Image (tube, coloured by chain):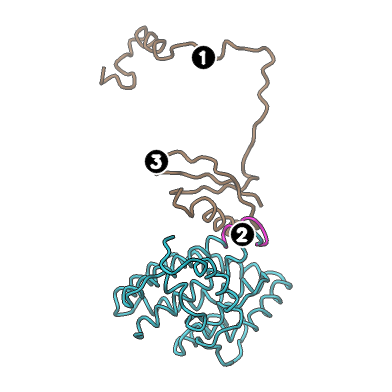
Chain colours: A brown, B cyan
Amino acid sequence: MVFEVFRQERKGQPFQHAGSVTAPDGTFAEIYAREQYARRQESVALWLVPRDAVSEIDEFPDEFEMKYRRVDGYSIKARLHEARERAGTLDMAPGAANE
Amino acid sequence: MSDRTDLLLALADDELILGWRNSEWTGIAPFLEEDVAFSSIAQNEIGHARALYELAAAELGTTADELAFDRRPEEYRSAPLVELRRLEWARTIARHWLYETADEIRLAALKASDDQEIAGLAAKIDREEAYHRMHAEMWIDRLLATDEGHTRLDEAIDELWPYALGVLDEELRPELKARAQERLGRALPDVEAKPRGVHEAELGELWEEMTSVRRSAPPGAQW
């Protein structure tokens, strides 16, 4: 069985994909993941996921090249500010207390 | 040499020699994940040896390196079990499991020692050995699960049993026997233990290799 291993470098940080281990079962996988991804104290926690349990999506059709969906070049922050002004909800914006 | 340093050297030599033996699988273990795991366990054992040599060295007015590498092979206090060169996986696993089981019994006794330094170090070592035991136990489960594995494990245990008894002082041997019999689900014979102090011929060969770099430099060389 192949297990995908995710490691957390420090408490509070996101788990990131570290690699995979091949093992006969979950018990072996835990031992092997511990030795491969944490023996030098480089991880504070590991997640092990059987590869079969991972759903993969790898098709993203874009028949009409809808480039206008992309946000490159927009100042999202400024746009949101304007929108909140119009809606009269400026005081509810994240960080409003600091402004 | 006091009883205390004698005990520390016996423990340290066991860990150093077994660590060395286990590291002989590095690069050639049955598969990659096992290779990494078994090599990591070997490195842990050598770390334990260093800590034990340091305790003995403080008392003897020497250093851990001198104790590990500057004694003659016949001066080592290791048990014959760890000296055997068994480059065959079922026997390696059988030796690993027998040693870890005996070591757990020995460490439990040391943790109760009146000597605070020894009790403290035994507790520290035991916290790492817990993972070695998990590794050994899962392999025993695996070998017991098939006819071929079971047969090969049985053969290896039969061969190594007198050696395993020799890791422990006489009063701790019955506990090893009881645990091993329960785990393996069969009776183990009453045999004479292969005691500490009588070395296997293979130790000389290991010693030559292990100390060759150090012996190649003049005494007192800085590394």
**Relative to B140, residue B198 above or below:** below
Q: The disc labelled 1 sits on which kind of residue?
A: Val
Q: The disc labelled 2 sits on which kind of residue?
A: Asp
| Labels 1 and 3 within one chain | yes
Label 1 CA crowd tier, 10 Å (few <14, some 14–19, many 20+): few
**Magenta: predominant secondary structure element?**
helix
Closer-to-camera residue (B71/A21): B71
Please state if B44 lies on the left or on the right of A22 as rendered.
Answer: left
**Relative to A98, residue B107 above or below:** below
SS assignment at label 2 = helix
**Relative to A95, residue B207 above or below:** below
Identify the mark at residue A12; answer none if there is no mark. 3
Question: Where residue A98 sits in the image (x, y, percent)?
Answer: 26, 20
Residue sticking out furthest to the front:
B218
**Relative to B93, residue A58 above or below:** above
Q: The disc labelled 3 sits on which kind of residue?
A: Gly
Question: Where residue A86 sits in the image (x, y, percent)?
Answer: 36, 7
Question: Where residue B132 sits in the image (x, y, percent)?
Answer: 51, 66
Asked whether disc 2 touches disc 1, contact meaning CB atoms under 8 Å apart, the reply is no
Which of disc 3 and disc 1 is earlier in sequence?
Answer: 3
Please state if B55 lies on the left or on the right of A35 as rendered.
Answer: left
Residue at mark 2 to residue at mark 3: CA–CA distance: 32 Å
Label 3 marks a residue whose chain is A
The residue depicted at 39 percent of the width and 83 percent of the height is: B6
Residue sticking out furthest to the left:
A98
Identify the mark at residue A71; answer none if there is no mark. 1
Instruction: Identify the residue position indicated by label 2 in the image.
Output: B35
* Magenta span contains residue B197: no
Q: What stretch is highlighted in magenta?
A: B29-38
Please state if B218 lies on the left or on the right of B86 as rendered.
Answer: left
Closer-to-camera residue (B144/B94): B94
Q: How many labels does the image show?
A: 3
